[in-house]
Amino acid sequence: MLLDDNTIVAIATANGIGSISIVRISGANALEIASRITKKNNFKPRLASLSPVYNHNDELIDESLVLYFKAPFSFTGEDIVEFQCHGGVAIANMIVNEVLHNGARMANPGEFSKRAFLNNKIDLSKAEAISKMIEARSEDAVKLLAKQLKGELSDFVNDIREDLLFMLAYTEVSIDYAEEDLPSDILEQIKSKIDKIQIKLNETLDASKRREGMIEGFKIAIVGKPNVGKSSLLNKLLNFDRAIISDIAGTTRDTIEESVKIGTHIIKIVDTAGIRNASDVIEQIGIEKSIEAINEADIVIALFDNSKACDEEDKKIISLLEENSHKQIIKVLNKTDLDNAFDKNKIMDFIELSTKNSIKDLVSKIETILDNNTHSDEMTLISKRQVQAVEDTLSHINTSLFPLETGEFEFFAHHIKEALESISNITRPYENEQMLDVMFGEFCLGK
C-alpha cells in the first residue's frame, strides 16, 4: 500500500443523485493509484478513456470516464486524475474508498484550490472568485466573477503594485545610494502616480459599495406607514401571498425577507413593519427593525396612500428618506384606484399605481436601477477582505503624502511598503525581493 500524505482525493460534485459524479485525485501518486484501481497503464494526458473501476477484491464498481492531467498542466499544478462515474452517492464514495485504500487521504476543505495557489496556478483573487461563482445566484454575479477568474482584478492589483514598487525603489535608492544619478523629475513622477492610484482606489471602493449586492442579491426595503399596502406590494412582486394582509394597523410586526428575480437580477425584498409612533413594545421593536432595514438596503421603496391625506406618519417617512438621500429611493403613490386625498406636492418624482392592478412601471424602474448598477466596466471587489485591503492601501498612501512633501523619505518609504503589503493581500503576499529586483535591475546598482 502506498503511504503518500501528499496525494488527496474528494468528490468534486454536489451531494445528491445526478447523472454524473466526479471524483478528483491530486498529487504525486494520482496516476499510479488510478492505474491500480482501473488495471490500466496507458492513460494519455487530457484524453478521456472509458475504464472499469475495481475494488481491492477485484469486484467491479463502475465503468467511468477517466481523465488524466499531467503536472504542471492541471488546476493544482500537480498530477490530477478525475473519475466521471455514474451519479449517486454510493458509487462515488466506493471509488473514494478505493483511492484511500491505496494510500491517498481525504482532501481538506478548499485544499485543491490551496494547492493551486501554492503552485502559482491561481492567486487569492481567483480563488475567491471560484468560491463565489459556485454560490452565484444571478447572471450578473456570474459575469462579474468570470472577469475576476480571467484575471481582471489581478491585473488591477499588479498595475498598482508596479507603481508602488517604482516609488519604493526610487526612494530606497535616494536613501541608500545618494551618489547615484536620479531623474530630476522623480518627485513629480511619484506624486503623479500617487494621484492616479488614489483616484483608482476611490473609484473602485465607490463602485464596489454600489454593487455589493450583486453576489448575494441586492436588498430592497419596502417602507411606509401602517396599511399603506407594503405587504400587498410584496405579495404582488412575489406573485404569491407571502405576507398577511389586513385592514388592522400593525399587522406586520417584523421584517419579512424573500428573494425574487427581476430581469437578470436576484433581489432580496424586505417588507417592513409600518413606521409610526407605537406604544406596543413588540410593534416598536418591529419599527426599529424597519429603520435598520432602510439603512442596510440598496434600494428603498417608500409607499404612500393616495386615498389618505399626508399626515405626521407620512412626514416621518419623508424625513427618513431625506436622511438616506444617498441611497436609490423609489417613491410610490399607492391605491390610485381610490379617490385622491394625498398632497402630491409633498413627494416629488413618484410612481402612481395600485397593487390591485399592474405594478409594471415599478418593476421596470427597479430593473433600470439594477442595470445601471451592474452593467459597467468599473472594477468591483467581491469580498469584505478585498474591500478592507483597498481601504488599508488608500489609508497608507494618504499618510505617506506628508513625509513625501517634507523630504522624510524613510517615513515615506515605510508607508509605501505598508500600502504594498495591503494591496498585495488581494492576490499574493508582497516579498521584499520584488523591490530589490526593481532597484538592481532597472537602476543597475551595485555593479
Image (cartoon, rainbow, N blue to C red):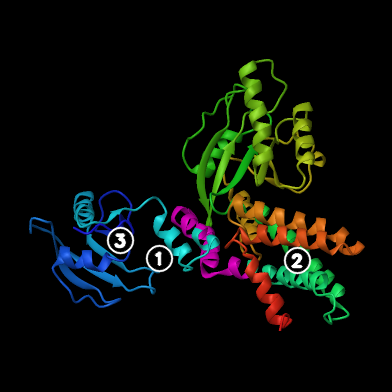
What SS does tag 1 mark? loop
- Looking at the figure, which quarter contains the C terminus? bottom right
Q: Which residue is mark 2?
A: 197
| Disc on the earlier residue, 2 or 3 | 3
Tell which tag, 2 or 1, sits nearer the viewer. 1
Rendering coords of residue 437 (x, y %): 65, 75
Q: Residue furthest left?
A: 58
Q: Which structural element holds mark 2? A: helix
Tell me the distance, in whole angstroms, between the alpha carbons under discs 3 and 1: 11 Å
Q: Quadrant of residue 374?
A: bottom right
**Image quadrant in which the N terminus is located:** bottom left
The location of residue 422, given as percent across then percent down, is 67, 57
Drawn side of residue 429 relative to residue 172, left or right: left
| Residue for badge 3 | 24
Q: Main secondary structure of the magenta part?
A: helix
The one of 185 and 87 positioned closer to us in this rendering: 185
Verify CB contact (< 8 Å) between mark 3 and mark 1.
no
Is residue 15 visible to us here? Answer: yes
- As displayed, is residue 223 above or below residue 380? above
For image coordinates 58% across by 38% down, the residue present is 270
| Magenta stretch, residue numbers | 128-155
Q: Mark 1 belongs to which amino acid? A: Thr
- Can you give x and y, in whole percent of width and height, for residue 443 in the image? 74, 81
- Distance between mark 2 and mark 3 Cα atoms: 42 Å
Q: Quick one: label 1, few (<14), some, or many (20+) residues within 10 Å?
A: many
As drawn, 275 above or below 97: above
The label nearer to you, 3 versus 1, is: 1
- What is the CA distance from the residue labelled 2 to the residue labelled 1? 33 Å
Looking at the image, which residue is at 47% across and 63% down?
118
